[in-house]
Amino acid sequence: MKTGFKLILITLPLAAIGLGILAYVVSSSPPPERLEVAERAAAVRVITAQSMTVTPYITGFGIVAPERTFEAIAEVGGRIDYVNPALRDGQILPAGDVLFRLSPADFNLAIAQAKANIRAAEARLVEIDVSEQNQRNALEIEREALTVKTSDLERAEALFSAGTMSQGNRDVTRAAHLAQRQKVQGIESTLALFPTQRAVQIEQIAVYKASLATAELNMARSEITLPFAARVASHSIEVGQYLKAGQTAATLDGIERAEVVVQLSMESFRGLVRLSQTSPPELLLDPSQMMQALRGLGIVAELQLRLGAEVVTWPATVDRISDGINQQSGTVGVVVVVENAYGRTGENIRPPLTKGMFVEAVLSATAVQGVVLPRSALRDGKVFMADAENRLQSTSATPQFEQGEIAVFTNKIAEGSRIVLVPPVPVIEGQLLDPHTDEAAMMRLLAGDAQQ
């Protein structure tokens, strides 16, 4: 059979039967149900905004150093006659203790010589007074003799004019008169020198007295005493050793106060100062006023030393800012001072705050009342919230300050608001949310930085 007849007799009837069956099924089947599309809620974690009091703080590290250091430097040279038996490295000595003493023999000789020079000069001054008085008495006598010689000369001149005296006799009388005048002139010249001689001798006495004062001062300098209670850091002297002037005999560190230069970032320290200010800052150019302004901010400091599981603390005071910026880290040095660094408070037995300790410093400002949120809840200056209808809302907010993992807001965020920790992606304003309260996140905030 040919292909054309097969197509007509077999294929076409089968296709017609299939189309008929399909038409019957479609016409007899019920129409499809129409399903309405429901809005899908995004699951998010939320916390309830709570207002609490938070103390702003920053931390830094530094090395302990004594506020005062005493170097026992010899001001005069000599052989050491006495050394304090307690002058040993690490020993604490009270104020007023004698550290060492030089042999007084040379200084006593210098004092005796200066005193002898003064007595000799004073005796010479008395001698000048006696000589002056003697010369004045001699001048009085010689002036009387000159008066007699003057009368003789006047008579000789009268007789010579009358022709009753030879010229030779007149010249003899004239020569005697001139000789007497010369004696008077010599005594007067001698008397004129006495004031100068007396002044020179008085100045010489002053020089000798200055030498005596120097000798007595050197005698006092031969004994070195400790001006304040201190701990011996190093010493290098023994009895019998010759000590040169300017040589360092010992170095001692004061124990009353210790200071730590705490390295802090400029940004964090500036933020802490800003939170401590109750009025706009003034430009202070006087260093003393700058120090008073810094101390008047009310910043509280505390030093902490970790000894295994134990943390030892010391109360401290912010004293001043160091003289420059650290070139390597770009941090500013804030100097904090600890009073009674070697003392004990009540039953708290703690190690002395000694030189070289590496400690942590915590600087805190006045407490701030505000809403505490995780820093992660702030995204591009916005905080996302779930409203009463579980719709996503956002608001622009700037925290008063950020600390650790928290941010503190004093406006824009109402207490009791439901804060979305991580908004859905993409963020669509007003989208439906399926909020789940994350109590653990809030507990971490309460136990962490918000409790400082």
Image: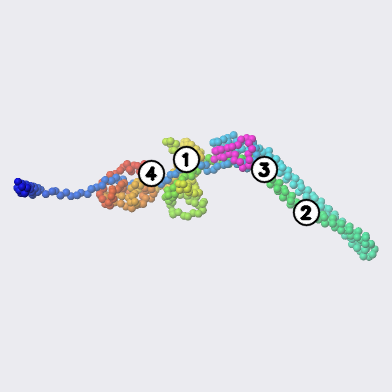
Of the residues under marks 4 and 3, which one precedes in the sequence?
Answer: 3
Residue 98 in which image quadrant? top right
Lateral position of residue 203 relative to residue 263, left or right: right
**For residue 249: magenta?**
yes
Label 4 to label 2: alpha-carbon separation: 92 Å
Residue contact between numbered discs 4 and 3, judged by CB atoms under 8 Å: no
Instruction: Give the foreground label among 3 and 1.
Output: 1
Residue, disc 3: 216
Helix, strand or loop under label 4: helix
Amino acid type of the residue tagged 4 in the rendering: Asp
Amino acid type of the residue tagged 2 in the rendering: Leu
Q: Which residues are magenta?
A: 231-253
Residue, disc 2: 193
Residue, disc 1: 358
Helix, strand or loop under label 2: helix
Percent coordinates x, y for residue 394 in the rendering:
30, 51
